[in-house]
């Protein structure tokens, strides 16, 4: 492969993905000619276009720049994609996103955060703490940071890399971090791994790639054997090397103390809800202390941290109506999200709209999904978003709905969802899922705000 620093033209297959778009923005920022394809227009692709990155949405080999030196692609691109076939058959240099991320960070001090959930929030927290504390940090985040309105953070020298390390397709094995965090190892991506044992084995392989003088911060409830570097634990609800105490909720804010080694205590006030986000903040604090950030700097940064879009993302927060959007697509993520909602709104009716993501995940985790969704007072279930998959016989939203233990539940099409929500008049509404449900969020928000205006004018 040509020296990545000398490449002048890069083409992206699947440029609209959250990880791919961050890479596209990075190369654009350092002066590379960037263009790409994605199958659908989204808010993110529209933003890339506004940033003078050429994006097209039809499979058209004539749209591929003739001077393309490198093609970066996502595993989500199907094998029968016309452009993918053309690029392979005509000798273009095709590389996965993860490999390029590894090349970009190989000469930087690298912090890598992974886990089946929590990694996006922890990555954005670490990046924000380091950025606000004056560190020369650059970061690739698997979501849009509200503080920076981007999935990419850059600095003048880009000395410290903070990256979200994706376990899907073992992508994180391209990284060799100085500091690593593993936040969760729940069964997921079983279409790739086959079993949880193989998933855990991959996390163990990731831990072995931490540099010789590095460190691993591991959630207290997790176990990894034969890790060569020091391992420090963290937890929100039990004693660990880094842990929380005095957690309480007052007027929509979370107050807690982060207890660290050497008797360091950091008192935090945060508007980012949920005990799971308290735990994420503990992990981020552990990393920050290791990189030399003072307790006071950590406190100030966490109190100005605004969160990530589609992670407990308030769209409407009024007395008459609360509307929250969340990316949760695993039973444990849904459980954590709904626990936070119930903690904040114990006397309100909670209505959830869930779009299952992938047939295989729905099949493998159906009982867990049913149990978590049963925490709602009211459920509207959308059809399964297939992403890269074909339907699996017997795996349907109806089969999932049948297992949810509540009376007030229904299937609904995306086309009729807003009409149904207006009819139900929710008190607290939460949209949940990782498919194209995000395309419904703005229309829902607009419609509900119009209803609020009518109510207030009556």
Image: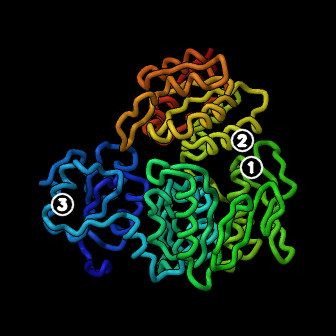
**Whole-percent x and y of residue 231?**
70, 73
Q: Quadrant of residue 218?
A: bottom right
Cβ atoms at labels 1 and 2 below 8 Å apart:
yes
Q: Quadrant of residue 61?
A: bottom left
Q: Relative to residue 259, is residue 212 depicted above or below?
A: below
First along the sequence among labels 1 and 2:
1
Which of 69/151 is in front? Answer: 69
First along the sequence among labels 2 and 3:
3
Which of 344/81 is in front? Answer: 81
Which of 276/211 is in front? Answer: 211
SS category of the residue bearing label 2? helix
Q: Relative to residue 374, is residue 139 depicted above or below?
A: below
Left-right relation of 380 to 103:
right
Mark 1, Cα crowd under 10 Å, few <14 / some 14-19 / many 20+, is: many
Cβ atoms at labels 1 and 3 below 8 Å apart:
no
Name the residue beneath numbered marker 1: 275
Name the residue beneath numbered marker 2: 340
Left-right relation of 434 to 372:
left
Left-right relation of 380 to 5:
right
Mark 3, Cα crowd under 10 Å, few <14 / some 14-19 / many 20+, is: some
At a point 12% along the width and 54% down the height, the residue shown is 62
**Whole-percent x and y of residue 285?**
71, 67
């Amino acid at each position: 492969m040509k020296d990545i620093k000398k490449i002048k033209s890069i083409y992206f297959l699947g440029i609209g993905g959250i990880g791919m778009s961050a890479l596209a923005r990075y190369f654009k920022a350092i002066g590379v000619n960037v263009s790409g394809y994605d199958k659908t227009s989204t808010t993110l692709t529209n933003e890339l276009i506004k940033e003078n990155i050429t994006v097209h949405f039809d499979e058209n080999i004539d749209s591929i720049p003739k001077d393309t030196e490198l093609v970066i692609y996502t595993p989500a691109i199907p094998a029968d994609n016309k452009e993918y076939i053309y690029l392979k058959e005509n000798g273009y240099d095709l590389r996965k996103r993860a490999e390029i991320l590894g090349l970009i960070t190989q000469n930087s001090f690298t912090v890598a955060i992974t886990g089946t959930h929590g990694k996006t929030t922890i990555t954005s927290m670490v990046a924000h703490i380091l950025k606000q504390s004056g560190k020369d940090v650059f970061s690739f985040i698997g979501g849009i940071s509200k503080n920076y309105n981007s999935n990419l953070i850059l600095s003048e020298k880009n000395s410290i890399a903070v990256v979200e390390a994706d376990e899907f397709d073992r992508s994180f094995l391209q990284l060799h971090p100085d500091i690593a965090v593993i936040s969760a190892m729940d069964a997921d991506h079983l279409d790739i791994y086959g079993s949880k044992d193989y998933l855990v084995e991959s996390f163990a392989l990731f831990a072995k790639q931490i540099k010789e003088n590095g460190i691993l911060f591991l959630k207290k409830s997790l176990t990894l054997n034969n890790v060569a570097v020091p391992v420090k634990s963290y937890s929100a609800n039990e004693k660990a090397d880094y842990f929380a105490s005095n957690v309480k909720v007052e007027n929509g804010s979370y107050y807690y103390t982060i207890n660290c080694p050497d008797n360091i205590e950091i008192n935090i006030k945060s508007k980012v809800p949920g005990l799971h986000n308290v735990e994420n903040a503990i992990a981020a604090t552990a990393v920050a202390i290791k990189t030399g950030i003072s307790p006071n700097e950590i406190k100030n940064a966490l109190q100005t941290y605004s969160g990530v879009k589609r992670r407990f993302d308030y769209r409407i927060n009024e007395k008459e109506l609360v509307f929250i959007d969340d990316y949760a697509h695993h039973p444990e993520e849904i459980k954590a999200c709904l626990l936070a909602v119930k903690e904040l709104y114990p006397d309100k009716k909670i209505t959830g709209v869930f779009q299952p993501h992938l047939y295989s995940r729905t099949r493998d985790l159906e009982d867990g999904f049913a149990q978590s969704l049963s925490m709602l007072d009211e459920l509207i279930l959308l059809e399964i978003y297939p992403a890269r998959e074909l339907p699996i016989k017997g795996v349907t939203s109806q089969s999932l709905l049948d297992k949810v233990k509540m009376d007030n539940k229904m299937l609904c099409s995306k086309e009729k969802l807003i009409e149904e929500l207006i009819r139900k008049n929710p008190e607290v509404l939460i949209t949940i899922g990782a498919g194209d449900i995000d395309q419904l969020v703005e229309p829902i928000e607009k419609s509900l705000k119009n209803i609020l205006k009518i109510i207030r004018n009556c």
